[in-house]
Structure formats: structure tokens, C-alpha cells
Amino acid sequence: MNDFLILIYNNPLAQTIRENEFAFPWIEATHVLAITLVIGSIALVDLRLIGVRALNHPISKISQDLLPITWIAFLVAIITGAVLFASNALSYSQNFYFISKLILLSLAGINMLCFQFIIGKNLDRWNNYQQLPIAARIAGTISLTLWISIIFCGRWIGFTLEPVLAIS
């Protein structure tokens, strides 16, 4: 695994990001903006699922309107996150908060898949409900909790990242 991480670390793009004083901050700012859009759009859906906000708005309409924003922002976040990772792959791969963030992202993905294909597969029939079924409220609560935890871990990565030298 270390050989693969060293290969990522030594690629020209990663070297450029490490050596250019403006590249990392711009990529990181774009990553943070994308994550903000992802979490903001997901939070709006989750708060409706939980029954806290937008109770007079159909859940399928909220979801349908926000889904394109979520996916585009998520794609940008994945790309910028991968580029940031490449810039210091060995250090990130050994950081507790980075590893935790990846695990939490996986759990959020599993929660989303369960909601999309099991719990909320017939979202349209809930449009006139102010309070959604308990399974939907639980899925929304889990999602919101996971995404807040992802933000927490992502924020702490920068404060706890220790350099690891790549010896090839």
C-alpha cells in the first residue's frame, strides 16, 4: 500500500500542488465550497424528512430540486478532495480524522442508498404528509448526524496532519 501512496505522492500534479503556494489554498477553498453545497442541500432534505422545516412543501419536490445541486457539488468535492489527498497521500492515509471522514462518507452513502431504494422508494406518496414515516425521520437524522460528523473530521484534518516523508 505504501508503494501505491508513494506513486500518488510523486505524480506531477501532486508535486505541483505541493510546490505552488497558491494551488493548495485554491483547491481547498473549492473543496470547502463544494462540501458546503453538498451538506447544505442534503440538510434541507434531511430537515424536511425529520419534520423540522418546510413542512408544507412536498418532500419529492424538495428532493427533486436539490438533487442536481447535490450531485454536481459532490462530484467537485470528490475531485478536489482526491487532488488534495494526492498532494500529501502518505500523511493523509495515516491521519485519524481523514480515515474517520472516509468511513463516515461511506456510511452516509449507505444511508442514502437505503433511503433511495428501500425507505423512500415511493417518495411521491408522502407529498401531503407533514410528518413523514418514522423510517424516513430516522434516515434523515442519521444523514444529518453523519454529515455534521464529516464536517467535524474534515475540519480537524488540517490541525492534526503530520508530515510523513515519502522515501522511494
Image (spheres, rainbow, N blue to C red):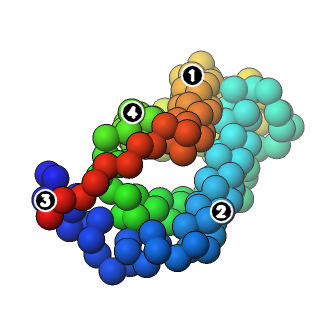
Picture quarter with the C terminus: bottom left
Task: Tell me the amino acid under the disc marked 2.
Answer: Ala
* Residue for badge 1: 138
Where residue 131 sits, quadrant-wise, is top right
- What is the x, y in percent for residue 106? 38, 41
- What is the x, y in percent for residue 75? 50, 65
Position of 146 with respect to 69 (left or right) is left
* Residue for badge 3: 3
Identify which residue is drawn at 82% across, 43% down.
57
Viewer-nearest of discs 1 and 4:
4
- Circle 4 SS class: helix
Check whether the beta carbons of the residues at disc 2 and disc 3 lie within 8 A of each other: no
- Local crowd size for mark 3, using a 10 Å CA cut-off: few (<14), some (14–19), many (≥20): few
What's the distance in space between the residues labelled 1 and 4, CA to CA?
Answer: 27 Å
Q: Residue 96 got which mark?
A: 4
- Circle 1 SS class: helix
4, above or below 16, in the image? above
